[in-house]
Image (cartoon, helix red, strand yellow):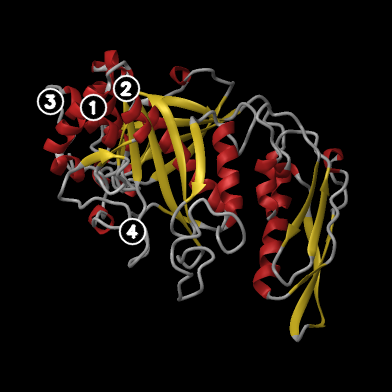
Amino acid sequence: MPKVLKYLTVSMEGEPENLACRDQLSDTAGLCSLHLEREHMQSFYQAEYRVARSRMTKEHDGSTSRKLDHRPRSGCNNGFRKVIMSIVTLTNRKQSQQLINNGLFLDLMKYMKLDQKGAVLAEYIWIDGTNGVRTKTKTLKKPVKDYTELPEWNFDGSSTGQAPSDNSDVYIRPVAIFPDPFRGGDNILVMTETWDPDGSPNKFNYRHECERLMEANAKHEPWFGLEQEYTILDADGWPYGWPKGGYPAPQGPYYCGVGTGKVFCRDIVEAHYKACLYAGLQISGVNAEVMPSQWEFQIGPCEGISLGDHLWVARYLLYRVAEEFGAKITIEPKPIKGNWNGTGLHTNVSTREMREEKGMKAIEDACKKLGERNEEHILVYGEGNAERMTGEHETASIDKFSYGVADRGASIRIPRQCAQEGKGYFEDRRPASNACPYRITGIIMETIFGGMEGLDLSKAEK
Protein backbone atom coordinates (compact mmCIF):
# COMPACT_ATOMS: atom_id res chain seq x y z
CA MET A 1 0.00 0.00 0.00
CA PRO A 2 1.62 3.28 -1.05
CA LYS A 3 0.87 5.19 2.15
CA VAL A 4 3.06 2.97 4.29
CA LEU A 5 6.15 3.98 2.33
CA LYS A 6 6.39 7.43 3.83
CA TYR A 7 6.99 5.78 7.20
CA LEU A 8 9.22 2.93 6.07
CA THR A 9 11.54 5.13 4.01
CA VAL A 10 12.39 7.60 6.78
CA SER A 11 15.53 6.63 8.63
CA MET A 12 15.84 7.18 12.36
CA GLU A 13 18.39 9.92 11.75
CA GLY A 14 16.18 11.55 9.14
CA GLU A 15 18.62 10.89 6.28
CA PRO A 16 17.17 10.73 2.75
CA GLU A 17 16.97 7.36 1.07
CA ASN A 18 16.12 6.15 -2.42
CA LEU A 19 13.20 3.85 -2.85
CA ALA A 20 12.04 1.21 -5.28
CA CYS A 21 8.77 -0.48 -4.42
CA ARG A 22 6.49 -3.07 -5.94
CA ASP A 23 3.03 -3.04 -4.49
CA GLN A 24 0.90 -6.18 -4.67
CA LEU A 25 -2.65 -4.87 -5.00
CA SER A 26 -4.55 -8.17 -4.80
CA ASP A 27 -4.25 -11.88 -5.44
CA THR A 28 -5.58 -11.54 -8.99
CA ALA A 29 -4.37 -8.03 -9.78
CA GLY A 30 -1.16 -7.17 -11.56
CA LEU A 31 1.84 -5.53 -9.94
CA CYS A 32 2.10 -1.80 -9.64
CA SER A 33 5.66 -0.49 -9.99
CA LEU A 34 6.57 2.73 -8.30
CA HIS A 35 9.93 4.49 -8.48
CA LEU A 36 10.66 7.62 -6.51
CA GLU A 37 13.63 9.88 -5.96
CA ARG A 38 13.54 11.73 -2.67
CA GLU A 39 15.28 14.92 -1.56
CA HIS A 40 13.80 15.14 1.90
CA MET A 41 13.13 12.77 4.80
CA GLN A 42 9.37 13.08 4.43
CA SER A 43 9.43 10.92 1.35
CA PHE A 44 5.95 9.94 0.44
CA TYR A 45 4.34 12.97 2.03
CA GLN A 46 5.94 15.06 -0.70
CA ALA A 47 5.14 12.95 -3.76
CA GLU A 48 3.66 14.65 -6.83
CA TYR A 49 1.23 12.08 -8.06
CA ARG A 50 -2.25 12.04 -9.59
CA VAL A 51 -4.62 9.52 -11.09
CA ALA A 52 -4.74 10.89 -14.65
CA ARG A 53 -7.68 8.93 -15.99
CA SER A 54 -9.51 5.66 -15.79
CA ARG A 55 -11.40 3.80 -18.43
CA MET A 56 -13.32 0.63 -18.77
CA THR A 57 -11.59 -2.11 -20.74
CA LYS A 58 -12.24 -5.58 -21.99
CA GLU A 59 -13.41 -8.47 -19.91
CA HIS A 60 -10.64 -10.10 -17.89
CA ASP A 61 -11.05 -13.66 -16.67
CA GLY A 62 -14.80 -13.30 -16.97
CA SER A 63 -15.04 -10.16 -14.81
CA THR A 64 -15.16 -6.47 -15.65
CA SER A 65 -11.78 -4.87 -15.18
CA ARG A 66 -10.56 -1.31 -15.01
CA LYS A 67 -7.26 0.08 -16.23
CA LEU A 68 -5.80 3.08 -14.53
CA ASP A 69 -3.22 5.28 -16.19
CA HIS A 70 -1.01 6.89 -13.57
CA ARG A 71 1.31 9.66 -14.72
CA PRO A 72 3.16 12.47 -12.99
CA ARG A 73 1.32 15.75 -13.44
CA SER A 74 3.01 18.55 -15.34
CA GLY A 75 5.27 20.82 -13.31
CA CYS A 76 6.40 18.20 -10.83
CA ASN A 77 8.80 19.40 -8.17
CA ASN A 78 12.44 18.58 -8.92
CA GLY A 79 12.58 16.48 -5.78
CA PHE A 80 10.20 14.05 -7.43
CA ARG A 81 11.29 14.06 -11.05
CA LYS A 82 9.83 10.66 -11.80
CA VAL A 83 6.68 9.04 -10.56
CA ILE A 84 5.95 6.19 -12.95
CA MET A 85 3.25 3.65 -12.34
CA SER A 86 2.37 0.81 -14.65
CA ILE A 87 -1.18 0.36 -15.91
CA VAL A 88 -2.72 -2.02 -13.42
CA THR A 89 -5.57 -4.37 -14.17
CA LEU A 90 -8.01 -4.29 -11.25
CA THR A 91 -10.67 -6.91 -10.75
CA ASN A 92 -13.22 -4.90 -8.79
CA ARG A 93 -14.32 -1.37 -8.02
CA LYS A 94 -13.12 -1.47 -4.43
CA GLN A 95 -9.50 -2.03 -5.50
CA SER A 96 -9.85 0.70 -8.11
CA GLN A 97 -11.20 3.17 -5.56
CA GLN A 98 -8.42 2.31 -3.13
CA LEU A 99 -5.78 3.19 -5.68
CA ILE A 100 -7.59 6.39 -6.62
CA ASN A 101 -7.72 7.39 -2.95
CA ASN A 102 -3.99 6.78 -2.67
CA GLY A 103 -3.42 9.03 -5.65
CA LEU A 104 -5.55 11.81 -4.23
CA PHE A 105 -3.76 11.47 -0.90
CA LEU A 106 -0.38 11.87 -2.54
CA ASP A 107 -1.58 14.78 -4.64
CA LEU A 108 -2.50 16.57 -1.42
CA MET A 109 1.03 16.20 -0.14
CA LYS A 110 2.32 19.00 -2.38
CA TYR A 111 0.85 21.35 0.21
CA MET A 112 2.55 19.55 3.10
CA LYS A 113 5.99 20.49 1.75
CA LEU A 114 5.26 24.20 1.45
CA ASP A 115 7.54 26.54 3.42
CA GLN A 116 6.00 27.42 6.79
CA LYS A 117 7.95 30.72 6.89
CA GLY A 118 9.46 29.95 10.27
CA ALA A 119 6.16 29.03 11.91
CA VAL A 120 5.77 25.82 13.91
CA LEU A 121 2.61 23.71 14.17
CA ALA A 122 1.90 22.36 17.64
CA GLU A 123 -0.69 19.59 17.89
CA TYR A 124 -2.21 19.79 21.39
CA ILE A 125 -3.42 16.37 22.58
CA TRP A 126 -5.78 15.75 25.48
CA ILE A 127 -7.97 12.98 26.89
CA ASP A 128 -11.71 13.59 26.67
CA GLY A 129 -14.62 12.56 28.88
CA THR A 130 -15.00 9.18 27.16
CA ASN A 131 -11.37 8.09 27.57
CA GLY A 132 -10.72 9.06 23.96
CA VAL A 133 -8.15 11.31 22.29
CA ARG A 134 -8.86 14.83 21.02
CA THR A 135 -6.48 17.29 19.35
CA LYS A 136 -6.29 20.79 17.91
CA THR A 137 -3.44 22.66 16.22
CA LYS A 138 -1.81 25.92 17.32
CA THR A 139 0.58 28.03 15.24
CA LEU A 140 3.76 29.07 17.05
CA LYS A 141 6.06 31.83 15.84
CA LYS A 142 9.25 29.88 16.46
CA PRO A 143 10.53 26.43 17.43
CA VAL A 144 10.44 25.38 21.08
CA LYS A 145 12.75 23.09 23.02
CA ASP A 146 10.67 22.49 26.15
CA TYR A 147 6.99 22.25 27.01
CA THR A 148 7.37 25.10 29.52
CA GLU A 149 7.77 27.48 26.56
CA LEU A 150 4.27 26.68 25.33
CA PRO A 151 1.12 28.66 26.16
CA GLU A 152 -1.95 27.32 27.90
CA TRP A 153 -4.94 26.92 25.56
CA ASN A 154 -8.62 26.00 25.86
CA PHE A 155 -11.43 24.11 24.14
CA ASP A 156 -15.19 23.59 24.26
CA GLY A 157 -15.60 21.01 27.01
CA SER A 158 -19.34 20.68 26.38
CA SER A 159 -18.50 18.97 23.06
CA THR A 160 -16.09 16.48 24.65
CA GLY A 161 -18.10 15.42 27.71
CA GLN A 162 -15.92 17.44 30.07
CA ALA A 163 -18.02 20.53 30.92
CA PRO A 164 -21.60 21.83 30.81
CA SER A 165 -22.62 24.10 27.94
CA ASP A 166 -23.21 27.10 30.23
CA ASN A 167 -19.62 26.93 31.53
CA SER A 168 -17.87 25.10 28.71
CA ASP A 169 -14.29 26.40 28.71
CA VAL A 170 -11.73 23.78 29.67
CA TYR A 171 -8.04 24.68 29.70
CA ILE A 172 -5.22 22.50 28.41
CA ARG A 173 -1.77 22.87 29.95
CA PRO A 174 1.26 21.37 28.15
CA VAL A 175 3.16 18.71 30.08
CA ALA A 176 5.38 17.08 27.41
CA ILE A 177 6.39 17.55 23.77
CA PHE A 178 7.42 15.14 21.03
CA PRO A 179 8.55 15.49 17.39
CA ASP A 180 5.61 15.26 14.97
CA PRO A 181 6.07 12.31 12.57
CA PHE A 182 3.24 13.47 10.30
CA ARG A 183 4.41 17.02 9.67
CA GLY A 184 8.11 16.62 10.44
CA GLY A 185 10.49 19.55 10.74
CA ASP A 186 10.20 21.60 13.92
CA ASN A 187 6.51 20.74 14.28
CA ILE A 188 5.57 19.05 17.53
CA LEU A 189 3.02 16.96 19.38
CA VAL A 190 2.02 18.38 22.77
CA MET A 191 0.64 16.19 25.55
CA THR A 192 -1.56 18.23 27.88
CA GLU A 193 -3.60 18.09 31.08
CA THR A 194 -7.17 19.40 31.32
CA TRP A 195 -8.06 22.06 33.90
CA ASP A 196 -11.27 23.84 34.89
CA PRO A 197 -11.64 27.65 34.95
CA ASP A 198 -11.46 27.74 38.77
CA GLY A 199 -7.91 26.35 38.66
CA SER A 200 -8.78 22.80 39.69
CA PRO A 201 -8.03 19.68 37.62
CA ASN A 202 -10.87 18.63 35.34
CA LYS A 203 -12.64 15.55 36.70
CA PHE A 204 -11.17 13.52 33.83
CA ASN A 205 -7.64 14.74 34.52
CA TYR A 206 -6.17 11.58 36.05
CA ARG A 207 -2.63 12.58 35.24
CA HIS A 208 -2.45 15.27 37.92
CA GLU A 209 -3.15 12.88 40.80
CA CYS A 210 -0.87 10.23 39.35
CA GLU A 211 2.01 12.68 39.09
CA ARG A 212 1.61 13.70 42.73
CA LEU A 213 1.94 10.07 43.78
CA MET A 214 4.93 9.53 41.52
CA GLU A 215 6.72 12.57 42.94
CA ALA A 216 5.94 11.55 46.52
CA ASN A 217 7.45 8.10 45.90
CA ALA A 218 10.30 9.09 43.59
CA LYS A 219 12.83 7.55 45.99
CA HIS A 220 11.48 4.10 45.04
CA GLU A 221 12.36 4.73 41.37
CA PRO A 222 9.30 3.02 39.88
CA TRP A 223 9.64 1.65 36.35
CA PHE A 224 6.65 0.72 34.24
CA GLY A 225 6.15 -1.08 30.95
CA LEU A 226 2.69 -1.44 29.41
CA GLU A 227 1.64 -3.89 26.70
CA GLN A 228 -1.08 -2.25 24.64
CA GLU A 229 -3.23 -4.75 22.78
CA TYR A 230 -5.68 -3.58 20.13
CA THR A 231 -7.72 -4.85 17.19
CA ILE A 232 -7.75 -3.46 13.64
CA LEU A 233 -11.20 -3.22 12.06
CA ASP A 234 -12.33 -2.47 8.52
CA ALA A 235 -14.71 0.34 7.57
CA ASP A 236 -17.67 -1.86 8.51
CA GLY A 237 -16.35 -2.51 12.01
CA TRP A 238 -15.35 -6.14 11.40
CA PRO A 239 -11.79 -7.38 12.02
CA TYR A 240 -9.58 -6.91 8.97
CA GLY A 241 -9.06 -10.12 7.00
CA TRP A 242 -12.04 -11.91 8.51
CA PRO A 243 -14.73 -13.26 6.16
CA LYS A 244 -17.67 -10.86 5.98
CA GLY A 245 -20.24 -12.07 8.48
CA GLY A 246 -18.08 -15.06 9.26
CA TYR A 247 -15.01 -16.19 11.16
CA PRO A 248 -11.50 -17.34 10.31
CA ALA A 249 -9.93 -20.61 11.40
CA PRO A 250 -9.65 -21.05 15.20
CA GLN A 251 -6.87 -19.40 17.18
CA GLY A 252 -3.48 -21.02 17.08
CA PRO A 253 -1.42 -19.91 14.07
CA TYR A 254 -1.86 -16.15 14.51
CA TYR A 255 0.20 -15.29 17.61
CA CYS A 256 3.52 -13.86 16.38
CA GLY A 257 2.53 -15.32 13.02
CA VAL A 258 4.20 -14.80 9.68
CA GLY A 259 2.63 -15.10 6.25
CA THR A 260 -0.57 -14.44 4.37
CA GLY A 261 -3.61 -15.74 6.19
CA LYS A 262 -1.83 -15.61 9.54
CA VAL A 263 -1.34 -11.86 9.94
CA PHE A 264 -3.30 -8.89 8.71
CA CYS A 265 -2.49 -5.18 8.35
CA ARG A 266 1.20 -5.46 9.08
CA ASP A 267 1.64 -2.26 7.05
CA ILE A 268 -0.33 -0.28 9.64
CA VAL A 269 1.70 -1.84 12.46
CA GLU A 270 5.04 -1.06 10.79
CA ALA A 271 3.97 2.51 10.00
CA HIS A 272 2.91 3.06 13.61
CA TYR A 273 6.15 1.58 14.92
CA LYS A 274 8.27 3.96 12.83
CA ALA A 275 6.07 6.93 13.75
CA CYS A 276 6.56 6.17 17.46
CA LEU A 277 10.34 5.92 17.05
CA TYR A 278 10.45 9.21 15.15
CA ALA A 279 8.43 10.86 17.94
CA GLY A 280 10.97 9.65 20.51
CA LEU A 281 8.55 7.36 22.33
CA GLN A 282 9.90 4.50 24.41
CA ILE A 283 8.33 1.82 22.25
CA SER A 284 10.16 -1.42 22.93
CA GLY A 285 8.48 -3.81 20.52
CA VAL A 286 5.43 -5.07 18.62
CA ASN A 287 3.90 -8.46 17.86
CA ALA A 288 0.82 -10.07 16.38
CA GLU A 289 -1.53 -11.38 19.06
CA VAL A 290 -3.59 -14.54 19.52
CA MET A 291 -6.71 -13.40 17.65
CA PRO A 292 -6.25 -12.53 13.96
CA SER A 293 -6.08 -8.75 13.34
CA GLN A 294 -5.18 -8.30 17.01
CA TRP A 295 -1.80 -6.70 17.68
CA GLU A 296 0.27 -5.40 20.55
CA PHE A 297 2.91 -2.74 21.08
CA GLN A 298 4.92 -2.26 24.23
CA ILE A 299 5.80 1.08 25.82
CA GLY A 300 8.57 1.22 28.41
CA PRO A 301 10.39 0.86 30.56
CA CYS A 302 9.60 4.42 31.62
CA GLU A 303 10.05 5.94 35.03
CA GLY A 304 7.14 7.55 36.85
CA ILE A 305 4.61 9.72 35.07
CA SER A 306 6.34 9.55 31.68
CA LEU A 307 4.89 6.09 31.01
CA GLY A 308 1.36 7.48 30.79
CA ASP A 309 2.47 10.34 28.53
CA HIS A 310 4.22 7.99 26.11
CA LEU A 311 1.34 5.52 25.98
CA TRP A 312 -1.29 8.16 25.29
CA VAL A 313 0.79 9.69 22.51
CA ALA A 314 1.38 6.20 21.08
CA ARG A 315 -2.39 5.66 21.05
CA TYR A 316 -2.86 8.96 19.26
CA LEU A 317 -0.29 7.96 16.62
CA LEU A 318 -2.01 4.61 16.15
CA TYR A 319 -5.38 6.24 15.53
CA ARG A 320 -3.84 8.73 13.11
CA VAL A 321 -1.93 6.11 11.11
CA ALA A 322 -5.02 3.89 10.87
CA GLU A 323 -7.02 6.92 9.77
CA GLU A 324 -4.75 7.30 6.75
CA PHE A 325 -5.25 3.65 5.82
CA GLY A 326 -9.02 3.81 6.17
CA ALA A 327 -8.98 1.39 9.11
CA LYS A 328 -10.46 1.61 12.58
CA ILE A 329 -8.75 0.82 15.88
CA THR A 330 -10.63 -0.59 18.82
CA ILE A 331 -9.25 -1.10 22.31
CA GLU A 332 -12.42 -2.71 23.62
CA PRO A 333 -11.53 -5.54 26.04
CA LYS A 334 -13.70 -8.10 24.20
CA PRO A 335 -14.24 -6.89 20.63
CA ILE A 336 -15.41 -10.31 19.37
CA LYS A 337 -17.59 -12.44 21.59
CA GLY A 338 -17.11 -16.15 21.90
CA ASN A 339 -13.99 -18.30 21.81
CA TRP A 340 -11.61 -15.47 20.97
CA ASN A 341 -9.01 -13.77 23.15
CA GLY A 342 -9.82 -10.38 24.58
CA THR A 343 -7.42 -7.44 24.62
CA GLY A 344 -5.55 -6.24 27.67
CA LEU A 345 -3.04 -3.70 28.89
CA HIS A 346 -0.67 -5.87 30.89
CA THR A 347 1.33 -3.69 33.24
CA ASN A 348 4.90 -4.52 34.22
CA VAL A 349 6.10 -2.94 37.47
CA SER A 350 9.53 -2.71 39.06
CA THR A 351 10.82 -0.58 41.93
CA ARG A 352 14.33 -0.02 43.16
CA GLU A 353 13.70 -2.48 46.01
CA MET A 354 12.52 -5.15 43.55
CA ARG A 355 15.61 -4.77 41.39
CA GLU A 356 18.05 -5.10 44.27
CA GLU A 357 19.46 -8.40 45.51
CA LYS A 358 16.77 -10.46 47.24
CA GLY A 359 14.20 -8.24 45.59
CA MET A 360 11.75 -11.14 45.37
CA LYS A 361 10.53 -10.34 48.86
CA ALA A 362 9.54 -6.84 47.74
CA ILE A 363 7.76 -8.36 44.72
CA GLU A 364 5.81 -10.81 46.86
CA ASP A 365 4.94 -8.11 49.42
CA ALA A 366 3.58 -5.95 46.60
CA CYS A 367 1.50 -8.84 45.25
CA LYS A 368 -0.07 -9.42 48.66
CA LYS A 369 -0.99 -5.74 48.97
CA LEU A 370 -2.48 -5.74 45.48
CA GLY A 371 -4.58 -8.77 46.38
CA GLU A 372 -6.06 -6.95 49.36
CA ARG A 373 -7.40 -4.22 47.04
CA ASN A 374 -8.42 -6.32 44.04
CA GLU A 375 -11.92 -4.83 43.88
CA GLU A 376 -10.64 -1.25 44.02
CA HIS A 377 -8.17 -1.92 41.22
CA ILE A 378 -10.79 -3.55 39.00
CA LEU A 379 -12.90 -0.38 39.28
CA VAL A 380 -10.24 1.63 37.44
CA TYR A 381 -8.81 -1.09 35.21
CA GLY A 382 -11.09 -0.39 32.26
CA GLU A 383 -14.71 -0.56 31.10
CA GLY A 384 -16.15 -3.92 30.03
CA ASN A 385 -13.34 -5.88 31.65
CA ALA A 386 -15.71 -8.50 33.06
CA GLU A 387 -16.29 -9.85 29.53
CA ARG A 388 -12.55 -10.38 29.18
CA MET A 389 -11.58 -11.61 32.67
CA THR A 390 -13.52 -14.86 32.75
CA GLY A 391 -10.78 -17.24 33.84
CA GLU A 392 -10.31 -18.35 30.23
CA HIS A 393 -8.19 -17.16 27.32
CA GLU A 394 -5.16 -16.45 29.52
CA THR A 395 -7.03 -14.40 32.12
CA ALA A 396 -7.91 -14.75 35.78
CA SER A 397 -11.48 -14.48 37.05
CA ILE A 398 -12.29 -10.85 37.68
CA ASP A 399 -13.43 -11.44 41.27
CA LYS A 400 -10.62 -13.79 42.30
CA PHE A 401 -7.06 -12.64 42.92
CA SER A 402 -4.02 -14.84 42.50
CA TYR A 403 -0.35 -14.57 41.67
CA GLY A 404 2.23 -17.08 40.56
CA VAL A 405 5.41 -17.72 38.65
CA ALA A 406 4.98 -17.92 34.85
CA ASP A 407 1.20 -18.26 35.30
CA ARG A 408 -0.71 -16.39 32.59
CA GLY A 409 -3.96 -17.47 34.16
CA ALA A 410 -3.16 -15.55 37.34
CA SER A 411 -3.97 -11.94 38.20
CA ILE A 412 -0.26 -11.24 38.70
CA ARG A 413 2.46 -13.12 36.82
CA ILE A 414 6.01 -13.21 38.10
CA PRO A 415 8.34 -14.06 35.18
CA ARG A 416 10.25 -17.27 35.69
CA GLN A 417 13.57 -15.54 35.06
CA CYS A 418 12.83 -13.11 37.91
CA ALA A 419 11.97 -15.98 40.23
CA GLN A 420 15.23 -17.72 39.33
CA GLU A 421 17.31 -14.57 39.84
CA GLY A 422 15.41 -13.58 42.97
CA LYS A 423 14.69 -10.03 41.75
CA GLY A 424 13.15 -8.04 38.92
CA TYR A 425 9.51 -7.17 38.31
CA PHE A 426 5.95 -8.46 38.16
CA GLU A 427 3.22 -8.26 35.53
CA ASP A 428 -0.30 -7.17 36.49
CA ARG A 429 -2.50 -8.91 33.89
CA ARG A 430 -5.81 -7.44 35.05
CA PRO A 431 -5.98 -4.06 33.25
CA ALA A 432 -8.18 -3.97 30.16
CA SER A 433 -6.87 -2.56 26.90
CA ASN A 434 -9.00 0.59 27.25
CA ALA A 435 -7.78 1.47 30.75
CA CYS A 436 -6.07 4.79 31.42
CA PRO A 437 -2.35 4.32 32.11
CA TYR A 438 -2.35 7.18 34.63
CA ARG A 439 -5.04 5.44 36.65
CA ILE A 440 -3.30 2.05 36.45
CA THR A 441 0.14 3.21 37.52
CA GLY A 442 -1.27 5.67 40.04
CA ILE A 443 -3.33 3.13 41.97
CA ILE A 444 -0.48 0.61 41.90
CA MET A 445 1.77 3.18 43.58
CA GLU A 446 -1.00 4.05 46.04
CA THR A 447 -1.52 0.39 46.97
CA ILE A 448 2.15 -0.53 47.35
CA PHE A 449 3.44 2.59 49.11
CA GLY A 450 0.34 4.17 50.61
CA GLY A 451 -1.91 7.02 49.57
CA MET A 452 -1.81 10.77 50.08
CA GLU A 453 -4.21 13.02 51.91
CA GLY A 454 -7.04 14.08 49.64
CA LEU A 455 -6.29 11.43 47.02
CA ASP A 456 -8.16 8.20 46.35
CA LEU A 457 -7.39 6.67 42.97
CA SER A 458 -9.69 3.71 43.54
CA LYS A 459 -12.84 5.70 42.70
CA ALA A 460 -14.41 4.67 39.41
CA GLU A 461 -15.41 8.30 38.83
CA LYS A 462 -14.46 11.48 40.63
Q: Nearer the viewer, residue 373 or 156?
A: 373
Please name whichever residue, 93 or 385, is drawn nearer the observer in this view of the structure: 385
- What is the C-alpha distance between the residues marked 2 and 3? 22 Å
Question: Which mark is first along the chain, 4 or 2?
Answer: 2
The mark that comes first in sequence, 1 or 3, is 1
Q: Residue at x 30, y 24 (%)?
A: 422
Mark 2 vs 1: CB contact within 8 A: yes
Q: Which mark is residue 445?
A: 1
Give the vertical position of 441 relative to 383 (above or below): above
| Left or right: 334 as drawn, with respect to 7 | left
Query: Regarding mark 2 in the picture, which secondary structure is present there?
Result: loop
- Disc 3 and disc 4: Cα gap in Å? 34 Å
Residue 385 place in picture, x, y as percent: 26, 53
Marks 1/4 in contact by CB < 8 Å: the verdict is no
| Label 4: which secondary element | loop
Q: Secondary structure at mark 1?
A: helix
Image height of 340 relative to 58, above or below: above
The residue carrying mark 4 is: 334
Tell me the quadrant of the picture where the N terminus can be found.
bottom right
Secondary structure of the residue carrying numbered label 3: loop
The amino acid type of the residue labelled 1 equals Met
Q: Amino acid at mark 4?
A: Lys
Dot label at residue 454: 3
Quickly name the residue at label 2. 222
Of the residues tagged 2 and 3, which is closer to the observer? 2
- Label 1 with label 3: CB-CB less than 8 Å: no
Given the image, on which type of amino acid does mark 3 rest? Gly
> Going 56% across and 43% down the picture, which residue do you hit?
272
Residue kind at label 2, given as amino acid type: Pro
Q: What residue is at 37 percent from the left and 63 percent from the top?
A: 340
- The answer to whether residue 192 shows anywhere in this view is no
Q: Position of residue 165 (x, y in %)?
A: 27, 47
